[in-house]
Amino acid sequence: MDLVILAAGEGKRFGGNKLLADIDGLKLYEYMEKIYERAYNFENKVIVSRNPDILEYYKSKGFIDVVNNKPELGKSRSIKLAVKALKEIKHSESVMFGVCDQPLLNPVTVNKLINEFQSSNKSICSVRCKERLGNPCIFSANRFDELLSLGDDEGGKKIIKKHMDETLFVDIEDADELLDIDTKEVYQYVLDKIYKTS
């Protein structure tokens, strides 16, 4: 299993680079790396960002660093850059895509997704809470060409919705695990929850 972390968003709604925000003494991008590091021993790991500090940090953790210097061209750009990077090396049979602004994601959930996917005969896997789909999600390598054919502002959900019969949905109870820090209000909510439980 390979891992791709997408960290090239512009953070317009947050009013700055949210990935630099402090979460329990770490920058958000550092905090997210720890979640995935605790969850599973991935074969290849890719970080997609345009921030030199983020790229350098992840590179020091064994990630392949991929620069997306034009995130404004659409969310599929980071996905495509990551897939192209994996195709250039000896990649595994599947890849997990995660985002870098989801600090309430539990490493146990990440591990559960991987284990259930690997025990299934499906080619796609998505975490779900009630009817809400979220990240992370997993695609078999035989879905790479479809990922590369996504339109500018399309994401993996388009492929999931096209292949519902080929998708394993792993249900979780806590919707907060799927929260992206898009605004200062969500950031404060996340901080309150983390400090309340720590």
Image: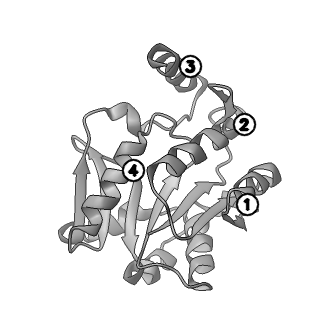
> What amino acid type is highlighted by mark number 1?
Lys
Could you tell which of marks 2 and 4 lies nearer the N-terminus? Answer: 2
**Residues under labels 2 and 4: Cα distance?**
23 Å
Do the numbered discs 3 and 1 sit on residues whose CB atoms are within 8 Å? no
Mark 2, secondary structure of its residue: helix
Depicted 68 relative to depicted 175: above or below: below
- The residue tagged 2 is 20
**Residues under labels 1 and 2: Cα distance?**
17 Å
Q: Nearer the viewer, mark 1 or mark 2?
A: 1
Could you tell which of marks 1 and 2 lies nearer the N-terminus? Answer: 2
Do the numbered discs 2 and 4 sit on residues whose CB atoms are within 8 Å? no
Q: Nearer the viewer, mark 3 or mark 4?
A: 4
**Residues under labels 3 and 4: Cα distance?**
24 Å
Disc 2: CA contacts within 10 A as few (<14), some (14-19) or many (>=20)? some
- The residue tagged 1 is 59
- The residue tagged 4 is 110
Which mark, residue 188? 3
Which image quadrant: the N terminus? bottom left
